[in-house]
Image: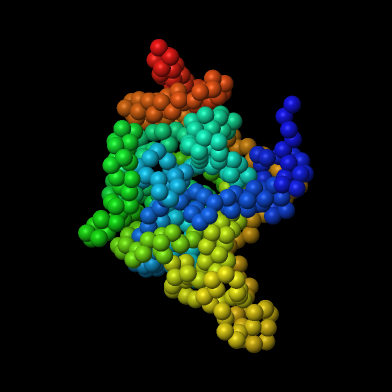
Amino acid sequence: MSKILTTESGAPVADNQNSAQAGIGGPLLIQDQQLIEKLARFNRERIPERIVHARGSGAHGYFEVTDDVTPFTKAAFLNTVGKRTDVFLRFSTVAGNLGAADAVRDPRGFALKFYTEEGNYDLVGNNTPVFFIKDPIKFPDFIHSQKRDPFTGAGEADNVWDYWSYSPESLHQITWLFGDRGIPASYRHMNGYGSHTYQWVAADGTAYWVKYHFKTNQGIRCLDADQAAELAGKDPDSHQRDLHQAIERGIYPTWTVYVQLMPVAEAAEYRFNPFDLTKVWPHSDYPLQRVGRLVLNRNPDNVFAEVEQAAFSPNNFVPGIGASPDKMLQGRLFAYADAHRYRLGVNHTQLAINAPKATEANNYGRDGYSAVNGGGRAKNYEPNSYDGPRQTDAPLAAPTAVSGWTGTHVAPQHTKDDDFFQAGELYRLMSKGEQDRLIANLAGSIASVTRDDVVERVLPFFHAADADYGKRLEAAVKAIRLADEA
């Protein structure tokens, strides 16, 4: 008989798959002990490197507005065509540790810090528009399944596919990961995505849901499994070296930045849940609208001081940009900042790479480890009568309506909200050659799983996505396993 899952205080856990929300589809609640406990503990499992995205590279540059988007957002850094804002971009792999190779099959982090005149704006995304899970309460378990096994000390295919076999929502991202774009040839030759849904608010108060797309101007270039294995062995630092050398030679990588915009009123009736991180908004529904261009033109002077100490948090918003009810985003609003407070200290925002550049931070935070700004003789409380900084009474973003009962709700279902449809759509968009390579990559990984029940549990997902996808993959897995037994 299975043991009952409990919190660290021994209380039984009623739901370990869904975070507590303010009504169905509403924002998450800080009262959810299981969510906060899991994320807080997860952030403190390792020191000093990041738990995820530990292996990273970065560069300085600028963002330039090329198109008028003032009808959609009042953000000051987007208010004038031709306006430039300094940025720092950190690329990374997800699962590897600090010394891991760059050329591996893994999503790539794409974390961008805008040093705007209204404060720093952090946009934390990946090189894929979707992710493996849709609820942050599952994130620590997901990452544990992808990292080193606590007993063997190595990554285990059994763990990876065992977890995925219980998480059919992962199928869309799996299809991305094992396809041709699963191993970028360099950081310069891949797209970036905000991935989450965010909110833009215009000066008149009109709100939109928004998704970000960064299209590489170098062209998409990727590696197949054999090329990646060879490159990872020859030069584990391949992506770091490529980015550094290109910028040193004056070959500055650039991306064209687009957004998809959805009027807030359309979200409830859209065919997919627009706040589900495992789903995309097809461009036929919400076309890309150009915003600007991103240019990287300066390497860090010190990798540790600038790349490793760079701290990104999606709760660093500026007026005109805000959060959405995207559950994964809601979890990250807490978890990212909390991870940096643990890893770098409560005063990490005072470090040069993280401090505002186009404005200054004025608040009543004081003391703690590594305090750079002691505040002098200024008062450390508010309100006060000593001319200290005061609130503006002007919200950064628009309010989001909520209703219903608090509880651990399953996400509301839209007409096309299943775990398989978009994975099948992605498969059907691929050419014959792309499908062949996808099947080969997946079959090689699944066939390495030692437990038959895991294989039998996961293969039906692919059949549900597309009949040809499932049929070909099942045959390929059987062929490899039979050959290994011979």
Q: Residue at x 33, y 45 (%)?
A: 236
Which residue, as the protein is rendered here, is positioned at the far left? 249
> Which quarter of the figure is the N terminus placed in?
top right
Q: Is residue 234 left or right of residue 40?
A: left
Total marks shown come to 0
The answer to which quarter of the image holds residue 435 is: top left
- Where is residue 242? Give x, y as percent: 28, 51
Which residue, as the protein is rendered here, is positioned at the far top? 486
- Where is residue 444? Give x, y as percent: 41, 26
> Which quarter of the figure is the C terminus placed in?
top left
8 vs 251, nearest the viewer: 8
Image coloring type: rainbow
Q: Residue at x 54, y 71 (%)?
A: 370
Q: Residue at x 59, y 53 (%)?
A: 44
- Where is residue 4? Give x, y as percent: 74, 35
Residue 347 in sight in this render: yes
Q: Is residue 142 left or right of residue 234?
A: right
The answer to which quarter of the image holds residue 401 is: bottom right
Q: Is residue 62 left or right of residue 262?
A: left
Q: Is residue 175 left or right of residue 135?
A: left
Residue 117 in sight in this render: no
Q: Residue at x 67, y 45 (%)?
A: 19
240 vs 166, nearest the viewer: 240
